[in-house]
Image (cartoon, rainbow, N blue to C red):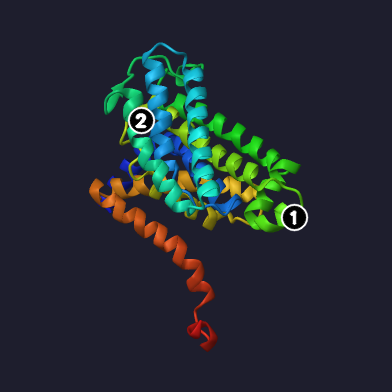
Amino acid sequence: MEFIQTVLASFISLVPVTLAQSLILAFVVLGIMIPFRMLNFPDLTSEGAFPLGGCVCGVLLAAGVSAPLAIGFALLAGFVAGCCTAFIHLRFRIHTLLAGILMMTMLYSINLRIMGKSNLSVFGTPTVFDWVPFTTPGFTASKIVVAGLLGLLVFLGLNSFFKTEKGTGMRAVGANPDMAEAQGINVWLATIGGVGLAGAFSATGGALMVQSQGFADVNMGLGILINGLASLMIGEALVGKQTVFRQLLAPFIGAIVYYQLVSLCLAAGMPPPDLKLATGLFVLAMLALPNLRRNRGPAPAREILR
């Protein structure tokens, strides 16, 4: 009983910190979801776009650029990275995953070039988290407010966009590109724009994370893809993916729940190196459970032969 009380007390103390972190990294989960679900374009660019946004933001903050403008340039850099991934796939007929790996690999060198070194401290520079009234600048409450408001604006904006003619056309490309092209939809423009938008959100998450933690690092994206995928799977398992509203809500709900689960593991005494194992098990469980529910009996003969 005492152990459970200790774990609960530790978990509760970590909730505000992990909530702020999850709201920031929800942008990365959104950047994973849009190509994956909306465009049927499995993509790995997020793991490179996230540190790209952080590096661009860090360099600009160190140069005295305002925090919102630094986020804007980071967003633009992520958009360009996503567009390049889509162009590589479309122009050279390279598989989406390989195109993402190539872009992610190249971005590592680009990030080093941008910063000129492997990490950069921006501690003490003004950030967007300093603008929240009635809170201590840079503390957890201000991070939750800013990241939460930005996430709400993005959610509402995307929910409206994907119901417009352009947004519906982008979803149609993901559902059936041949039919979409027959209906006069520009497949190239929709694909490049959609993957670019995803890269922009991932880079925005990186820029917000740099302003939150006070430093930029070229390795800050290591493992972010599996964390984002785990968050997406959990979110879809909880809210579903049958409508645009649910598809857009899943990244935010999933990120919050996933990082609370991570927090619970840490509070229970799990060593940090084992968190990757736990993350992999989370993803495996979310992917396997729906199939196990559908296939409780033996597989039909035709399925085995197939």
The residue depicted at 69 percent of the width and 43 percent of the height is 167
Q: Position of residue 138 (x, y in %)?
A: 40, 21
- Residue receiving disc 1: 182
The residue depicted at 27 percent of the width and 28 percent of the height is 118
How busy is the neighbourhood of tag 2: few (under 14 within 10 Å), some, or many (20 plus)? Answer: many
Task: Spot the residue most to the front.
Answer: 92
Q: Position of residue 122 (x, y in %)?
A: 33, 19
Q: Position of residue 160 (x, y in %)?
A: 70, 39
Residue 59 drawn above or below residue 35: above
Amino acid type, residue under disc 1 in the picture? Ala
The local secondary structure at tag 2 comes to helix
Relative depth, front residue between 26 and 224: 224
Relative depth, front residue between 229 and 98: 98
Q: Which mark is residue 272?
A: none
The residue depicted at 34 percent of the width and 36 percent of the height is 108
Q: Is residue 130 visible?
A: yes
Task: Spot the residue most to the top.
Answer: 64
The residue depicted at 38 percent of the width and 12 percent of the height is 63
Marks 2 and 1, how far apart at CA: 40 Å
Q: Is residue 252 visible?
A: no
Of circles 2 and 1, which is in front?
Answer: 1
The local secondary structure at tag 1 comes to helix
Q: In this rendering, would 118 be left or right of 57?
A: left
How busy is the neighbourhood of tag 1: few (under 14 within 10 Å), some, or many (20 plus)? Answer: few
- Residue receiving disc 2: 111
